[in-house]
Structure formats: C-alpha cells, structure tokens
Image (cartoon, coloured by chain):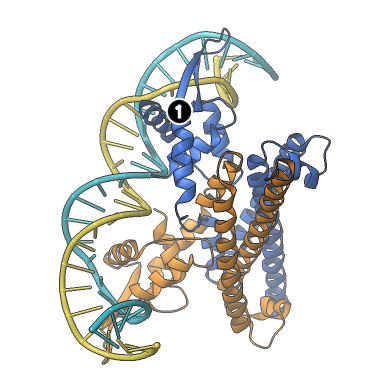
Chain colours: A blue, B orange, C yellow, D cyan
Amino acid sequence: MALRHAVLAALLDEERSGYQLAKAFDVGVANFWHALPQQLYAELTKLEREGLVAGREVVQETRPNKRVFQATEAGLAELREFTAAASKPSFIRDDLLVKVQGADHVDSGQLIEQLGERATAAEAKIELFSALLHQMRGDESEDEFLLDGERIGPYLTCLRGLAFERDNRDWCRRIADVLRARQAAALSHRPG
Amino acid sequence: MALRHAVLAALLDEERSGYQLAKAFDVGVANFWHALPQQLYAELTKLEREGLVAGREVVQETRPNKRVFQATEAGLAELREFTAAASKPSFIRDDLLVKVQGADHVDSGQLIEQLGERATAAEAKIELFSALLHQMRGDESEDEFLLDGERIGPYLTCLRGLAFERDNRDWCRRIADVLRARQAAALSHRPG
DNA sequence: AGGCCCATGTAATCTGTTACATGATTCC
DNA sequence: GGAATCATGTAACAGATTACATGGGCCT
C-alpha cells in the first residue's frame, strides 16, 4: 500500500486522467515518486472500485475520450490516515551513482559522458520546476505566497524537487571535472 | 537486473559479509540504493553461483561464523558492461513528500512533527557522512585527495549523499516553519 | 509515409516486502 | 533478566517491469 497515496495526493486539487497522471509520474511528480502508466491505470481502477476516487467520462472530438478522476471524501480520509502514520524512510535508486561508486575500476570516458547527460537533464528539470513555481505563486513573493496561498502543497514539494535537481546538476559537473582532471594527470605521468 | 550491480560495486574494494552489506544498504549506501537483508543474502547466493563474486568462510570464536564476498574478474566485467549501458533515470520514493503534497487538506501538527523527526535523522546522516569523508581523505584537502587518491568512488557517492541530506534537513526545517507560520496566522484571524 | 502524441489497458515475469525461523554473545 | 548485535536464511505475498495490443489524429 504505497502508490495509492501518491495517486490520491495528486488527485486532491484537480481532476486528471490516467494519461495525465502518467506524464506527471514520469517526470517524477516533482521528484518524489515514480510509476509507470500500467501501474497508474491499474491503481485508478482499484481506487475507483473502493470509492476513494470518482471518475467521469470526458467526451472529446478530435482525441479519444478519456476518464478523469478526483479524490473523494473517503479518499481524503484514507490520505489523512496515511499522514497520521509513521513515514517509511525515503528511498533512492540511481544507476549512475552505482557506476560512480565503481569509478576507480571502470572507463572514465563513459562516466564523464553520462554525467554530462545527467547534468543536462537536471538543468531541464530546474527550468521546468522554476517555471511551475513561478506560475503557482503568480505576482507574489515566495514568502508571501507561502503565508497566504490556498494550495501550497504542490509548491512545497516542487521546491524540494528543485533543490534536488540543482544538487544533481552541480554534483554531476563537479564529478565530471574531477574525472577529467585525473585523466589529464594520468596522461602527464605516463605520456603517450 | 539492478540490485546485482549495486552489490558488485560495493564488493569491489573490500570483502564484506551479507550482514555487513545489509547494514550499508540499510543506511542507503550513501543514499543511492536501498535493500533488505533477505534480498542481499539471496543476491549474494545468485552472484556466487554465477561466479561474479567469490565467497570465503571466516571462522570466528565469539561470534557466529560468516561468509565474506568480493567481486571477481567476471563480476568486474559485468559491472563494466552495466556502466557502458544507458542509465535508467534515478528514482525516488518518499512518503513524507506525498504527505506534504496534501498539506492543504491534512492536519499540520502531524506534518510539522514528522518534518522535525526527518530533519533530525538528516542531521545524523550529515554527521555520519562528514565523518566518513574525513576518514577517507585523511590529512589531505578534498581537492588533493580527489586528484591523487586511489579509491575515490566511495568518496564521490558519499559527497552526493551529504548534499542530499543537507537539502533534506534544510527543506524540512523551512517547510515546518512555513506550516507553523500559517497556523499562527490562522489563529490570529479567528482567535479564541 | 513515418513518427509522435493522445488514450487505455492485459498478461507474464521479475523484484521486493512481510512474516517466520534460529541461536549465541555482549551490553545495560 | 531483557535488549541489542551478530549471522543467515525460507516461504508467501505484494508490487513493479516488460512485452504485447489497439487505434485515431497531427505534424513534417
């Protein structure tokens, strides 16, 4: 029981279709959860059957029809129970970090390349999250918005995502620099 | 096929038992992987059967005997293949972030409490990682160590973990402050 | 004509979690 | 005397990934 609460939290403020949810979870829901479309469709079916979300058909002309969902009172109650309970420790998995852990035993060139790609991806997310934050707070300053805004939850989680991606970008660049410097040092010690 | 590479990377530089690995993976291996002891024992059995790690029995007098493992040449080759392949996007799961996403609909008191606990846990990890880093680099400055150190992989991943936990701590404190300020504002608007 | 976006699923397989099981030693 | 640490697993179940399946519209 885990994905259900992430889905409920995403359906509190607005209606979304499975497809829209899938896109949000692909980006990572501002970097705190991850799920594939198949899981989301399955979970939405379960949640609707249990009355925790309510779905309604939206007929579209140029696109296929879709079903959009929103959390019900029962769904909110479920989320409140979840919130009251202890949190599991947060949990990360990152292939790239595994690779860097073995940095002394593998080809640096490949790592440097992948670190560069990851830094670029992080930069893209930074811009995305910055834009989302700006959009949510409108004209207000961040402090003002966080004091008097009505829906600050998504803003707060997006702030965490932004900080995460900034660290990510900075770390990737730093590590790539370190590995390049070591390549250069190795060359000068035993030149070609 | 995923845990196997995290395990291989952890067994490159030193021999470890399943139990020692389990402790490392419980802390999160500097925040980039997580696994339960049962998974690790199972994975070690598989890896040994496939010749990717080599185990040897260590007889102990006051403690139960243990089997320690280290990556073999074949294991290193497997890790190199993994490193050459594309990385899956990194992947996070955090109950607490799900709860904060729903902050506008749930009890702030509970959230503030859990944010405080998480900040404390993050602080503990910050101290742990700082100590580990200091231990690894010895007398050298970080830049010196990263340029001429022999085993920098674990240092680099630990740096990432440290940055992550600092952000974590700072974010938790900031969000708790925001929620407290909103509680106070709500009280002053409808006092008594 | 080919590729991408919208939109939703099923089925088989692989991975991860929870519950259970055992037993000695050391610390408070 | 009770809790924590060391040490290693099995078995049942829940959750996640991969492969497969379909089909119209939009853009180049």
Q: Is residue B129 visible?
A: yes
The residue shown at (64%, 40%) is A154
Q: Nearer the viewer, residue B92 or A149?
A: A149
Label 1 environment density (alpha carbons within 10 Å; few <14, some 14–19, many ≥20):
many
For badge 1, the amino acid type reads Val
| Vertical comparison of B126 with A30: above or below | below
Q: Residue at x 35, y 67 (%)?
A: B52
Count of number-bearing discs: 1
At horizontal 70% and vertical 80% (from top left) the residue drawn is A189
Q: Is residue D2 left or right of residue B15?
A: left
Q: Nearer the viewer, residue A49 or B22?
A: A49
The picture quadrant where one finds residue B142 is bottom right
Read off the chain for label 1. Answer: A
**Kind of element beneath mark 1:** strand
Q: Is residue B121 left or right of residue B61?
A: right
Quick one: quadrant of the C terminus of chain B?
A: top right
Depth check: give the residue in front, B192 or A178: B192
Query: Could you say which is closer to the camera, residue B68 or residue B176?
Result: B176
Q: Quick check: B29 above or below A140?
A: below
Percent of width and height locating residue B47: 32, 64
On screen, residue B14 above or below B192: below
Check disc 1 and report the residue beneath it.
Answer: A53
Q: Return the x and y of residue A3 as percentages of the image width and height.
A: 44, 41
Percent x, y of residue A74: 43, 32
Answer with the quarter of the image where residue B76 lies.
bottom left
Task: Kindly identify the residue that appears in the image at 59 percent across and 40 percent down.
Answer: A27
Q: Position of residue A33 (x, y in %)?
A: 52, 45
Could one spot residue A32 in this view of the protein?
no
